[in-house]
Amino acid sequence: MQTPNRLGTTPRLPMPNIKRLSALVLTALFVAACTKTEPLPEPAPANDHAAKPVTSDTVKLAPDALSKIGLRTTRVFPRAVHDDIVTTGQIQADENRVFHINSLAPGRVLDDRAILGDVIARGQTLAIIENLEVARIYADFIRRYHENEVEIKDSETKLALAVNNLTRTQQLFDEHIAPQKALIQAQTEHILATRAVEAFKEKSTHIEEEARSLLLAYGVTLRDIRSEKLQTTSPITAPRGGVITKKTVTVGDVVSVQQTLYEVADLTQVWLDITIYDKDLPRVKEGQIANFVSDSLPKRVFTGPINYMRPSTGDNTRTFLARVSLKNPGFLLKPGMFGQVTILEPEDQSKVYVPAEAVQSYGKENFVFVDLGGARYKKQPIQLGKKVEEGFLIETGVSAGEPIVTKGSFNLKAAVLKGEFAEEE
């Protein structure tokens, strides 16, 4: 700001020299045009062994860095796998091999010889009951047998008389004393007496066989008739072998013919009833192989084909049922056993398998490092499929035969992608 002079007026400044100003501007422009500007050098990397990016997804490691990280590669290979269905199952007795044992006659239980869970054989006696029907059959047999014995003795006496009469008449006829008619009469009486003895003896056999058959139906053997002691009991025997799964009788009970005393299951073959959920039903077919591991026998695997599919749920659980018939040597499998069932599906050769240590992730992206050779590695995004043992099936991203980094994959990610994934926590 200019200050007024003593006279109260503001002094005037001299006008700039226009020609001189123009010359200065031209000189400055010329100097600027003749000056060469060099770009600033990039800062040297802190570590000469760091990865050197080639493209956004490909890196190259220096020899020292490659040795330090210790990478190991393997080739991707196809794997035959089963898209298995894992569910639960329970052992049941084969209903076609389950039978009930009843008494053929009412009576009181005098002896109980079997307990629940016993393994029994065919013909084994399970109980003894007091059987009035057996007593009646035995008493009737003895009465009829003795009556017939009397008839046999009477007929044998008549036969002896007929023999003597025939002998005497034959002598008189030979001496021409007795007429031929008398001889014929004596011969006829002898024949009739002989037939009577044979008939009564045959009747005795029939009486004995009839009683034997009636008693055998109750499991009783006919004793020697000479003992003349009535049989009043009968055994309850097993018509087949198996395991007693249910018992409703004990000593002193009065049983009827309608009452089931024992339920027995032949456990040489059992059913495995498998739970099938609605979502898995279209994938399950008869003939598929199922493996069963019981909670009670964790080290044993029982295998068989599905041979039955229940057409409806049968209850309000909305689950279906598939069934496998399993051989059961040694009766290891028992009704009620529960465990895990794996239903095997046909093999699928279209997918490849990579070890879990080769798979890395960042955010929602999963990837592997493909070995391009010459210490060059490419980050290859992949889509993971089902986990199988110590790795994954790959839906997309890599093909069979491609070399990928396994051991050291995480170190490669940390060393090579540190700058690229600077935001990764």
Image (cartoon, helix red, strand yellow):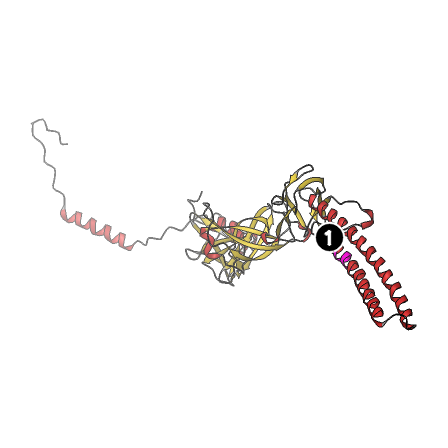
Classify 10 Å Cα crowding around label 1: few (below 14), some (14-19), many (20 and above): many
Q: Is residue 173 inside the magenta stretch?
A: no
Q: Which residues are magenta?
A: 202-206
The percent coordinates of residue 71 (x first, y second) are: 55, 54
Q: Amino acid at mark 1?
A: Ala
Q: Is residue 378 visible?
A: no
The percent coordinates of residue 148 (x first, y second) are: 78, 54
- 178 or 73: nearer the viewer: 178
The percent coordinates of residue 230 (x first, y second) are: 77, 45
Label 1: element kind: helix
Q: Is residue 204 inside the magenta stretch?
A: yes
Magenta segment main secondary structure: helix
Residue at 67 percent of width and 44 percent of height: 117
User: Which quarter shows the C terminus?
Assistant: top left
Q: How many marks?
A: 1
- 66 or 102: nearer the viewer: 102
The percent coordinates of residue 134 (x first, y second) are: 71, 46
Name the residue beneath numbered marker 1. Answer: 211
